[in-house]
Amino acid sequence: MTIRVLLADDQALLRSAFRVLVESEPGMAVVGEASDGAEAVRLAKERAADVVLMDIRMPGTDGLAATRMIGADPDLARVRVVILTTFEVDDYVVEALRAGASGFLGKGSEPEELLAAIRLAAEGESLLSPAATKGLIARFLAQAGTVAPDPVRLARLDALTGREREVLVQVAGGLSNDEIAERLEVSPLTVKTHVNRAMAKLGARDRAQLVVIAYESGLVRPRTE
């Protein structure tokens, strides 16, 4: 199945470079280009995009607002957003993850990293490496003033079984399904089932949102080191 990619960036030169890269990869196709967030939302729906590569800073409707709009639209529930940023630490990225983005990628990333990110997003995975999860995301949330547990988030955890909570903690630690399976001495398929059930119960689009929920609920405490 071909992964349908939408490019959203106000710099035409960057869009052209991304287009060449994406269309050189078998199984991927660029279905549209947008220069602002509003256009990105419209084209995501019109062109049935699977993944949107979204610049976070654009004139007019920026990438953050566009990500929120996509995340709130039931018709776009299958669309995954990958935030592109020139900043390693950016509070806007945290807001984008809360809004439903699947993760973020630096504009200086290697071509192979960008293509891998598109594939992961299309598969419903988050673009958060173990290092990013344990370091950057925790630091983002701490900087954003969310150290105190959110009682609403915390209450929603009551819907989880003990095992699902346990798996959620491991996901927030940046572990893959295989790593969690080894640690908990269960099969990777069992872990995947627990992850999917946790996402359904918590209304999370993907693992990235599970990470944010784990931190904001206080189930996992942010670290700033």
Image (cartoon, grey):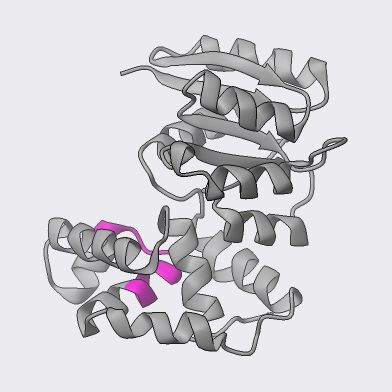
Q: Residue 20, how many percent across, how many down?
A: 62, 10
Judge left or right: residue 11 versus residue 17.
Answer: right
User: Splitting the image into 4 quarters, where does residue 94 fall?
Assistant: bottom right
Q: Position of residue 209 (x, y in %)?
A: 48, 61
Q: Give the magenta range.
A: 168-178
**How far from the left and from the top, in percent, is residue 11?**
83, 23
* Secondary structure mostly seen in the magenta stretch: helix
Residue located at (57% from left, 85% from top): 150
Res 35 visible: yes
Determine which quarter of the picture holds residue 66.
top right
Q: Is residue 167 magenta?
A: no
The part of the image, by quadrant, that contains residue 135 is: bottom right
- Residue nearest the viewer, comparing 45 with 8: 45
103 vs 149: above or below: above
* Residue 119 or residue 212, whichever sits in front: 212
Of residues 67 and 123, which is closer to you in this image? 67
Instruction: Name the foreground residue: 54 vs 176.
Output: 54
Residue located at (74% from left, 53% from top): 88
183 lies above or below 24: below
- Give the vertical position of 141 relative to 158 (above or below): above
Q: How many marks?
A: 0
Q: Is residue 223 left or right of residue 202?
A: right
Q: Is residue 47 above or below residue 60?
A: above
Where does residue 78 sit, x and y in percent of width and height?
A: 41, 38
Name the residue: 23% across, 73% down: 183
Q: Residue at x 50, y 55 (%)?
A: 129
In the rendered view of the protein, which quadrant contains the N terminus? Answer: top left
